[in-house]
Amino acid sequence: MKILFVNNKTINCGVYQYGKRVGKILSPRLSFFHYCEVVSLEEFLNLKDNYDIIVFNYIAAGRSNAPLGWLDQEILEELKGSGVKVGTVGHLNDVKFNFDFILSQYPSDQLRDDSRYYIFRPLPFDMVENPYIKNRRELDLIKRKVPRIGSFGFASKSKGFTGLIRIINSEFSKAEIRFHIASADYSDPTGEGTNNLISECKAIKTKSGISLNITSGFVDDESILDFLSGNDLNVFNYDDNEDGGVSSVIDFAISSGAPFAVSRSRMFRHVLENCLVIDKGLVNALREEEKFNDFFMKKWSHEAFTDRFLSIMEIIAN
């Protein structure tokens, strides 16, 4: 069995970052797994031969510059005709094309559709090798007089940054708010949307004891984890989205070792049963232990991810 995992090359993209983490986890563990990044159909055609299974890290985003936007049903049918099993990652509810299988983010999907296979989330760091968990244990957060509450993500009004400022302002008399807001190449290539969103955040009137610090620009995984692990609480206040997939911010929140809370957006439905929820109060969330991070770090360890991926591929191959 030889497996090819095809990713795009645009770094400022959550779909790309997901695929990159998959490659980082599986490449050293499975000798028959090959991870590649391509820009064009021509690049893909030059390396597609001699594989039994090809997984496309594709998203049906409805725009020409979406990841692997050159992929179409005709290409898939040609691959199928040559005996290759073709699949994709289910980033959205609608995958658009007729794949042989879908790596789904939701356990319930596998019960409803026998072509969907639930796959764990690929965390940036495994619990065994994670330096941020240790660093968190050494931080003396209890003595911090002003709680530090953070969030990060690509610039979008649906991410709820402005609403989060208002929530913090209503619940706290003193707090340090830290946001890292980046521009996505696909939705905000000029950065204008990011600048406008940052301006909106800064324009919100808050109590004198509430400070706001916003950084921007795309940074690597380690920098994001440093940022998150330095907060007392990380909060993700997304609007609901009927067609939204799973948000990858949670992968980083878990790996940072810091407590986190989320809205009831369906983009967090894969963790809602086992994490803190914003509408129960951020003051209460600050008092909670970091047990949820340990739960997910164990559930989605790199070993568990590899085992699950391998078991799915064996089913597909047979």
Image: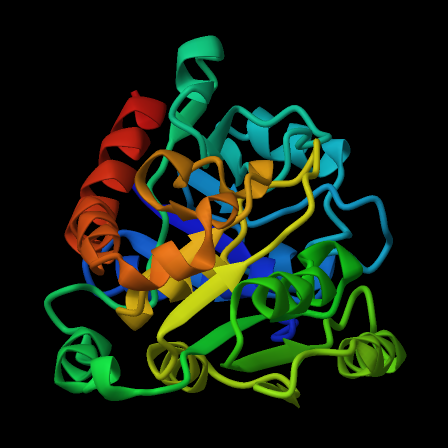
Front-most of 62 and 167? Answer: 167
Is 237 on the left-hand or right-hand side of 105? right
**Quadrant position of residue 134:** bottom left
Type of colouring: rainbow
**Quadrant position of residue 291:** bottom left
Vertical placement of residue 134 versus 119, above or below:
below
- The residue that appears at 32% across and 53% down in the rendered structure is 33
Is 135 on the left-hand or right-hand side of 276? left
Front-most of 78 and 235? Answer: 235
The x and y percentages for residue 237 are 60, 55
Inspect this view and state whether residue 67 appears: no
Inspect this view and state whether residue 53 appears: yes
The N terminus sits in image quarter: top left
The x and y percentages for residue 107 are 38, 26
Front-most of 294 and 47? Answer: 294
- The residue that appears at 42% across and 44% down in the rendered structure is 51
Is 57 on the left-hand or right-hand side of 299? right
Q: Number of callouts in the render?
A: 0
The C terminus sits in image quarter: top left
Front-most of 52 and 132? Answer: 132
- The residue that appears at 46% across and 52% down in the rendered structure is 281
The x and y percentages for residue 227 are 43, 84
- The residue that appears at 51% across and 34% down in the rendered structure is 87
The x and y percentages for residue 280 are 45, 44
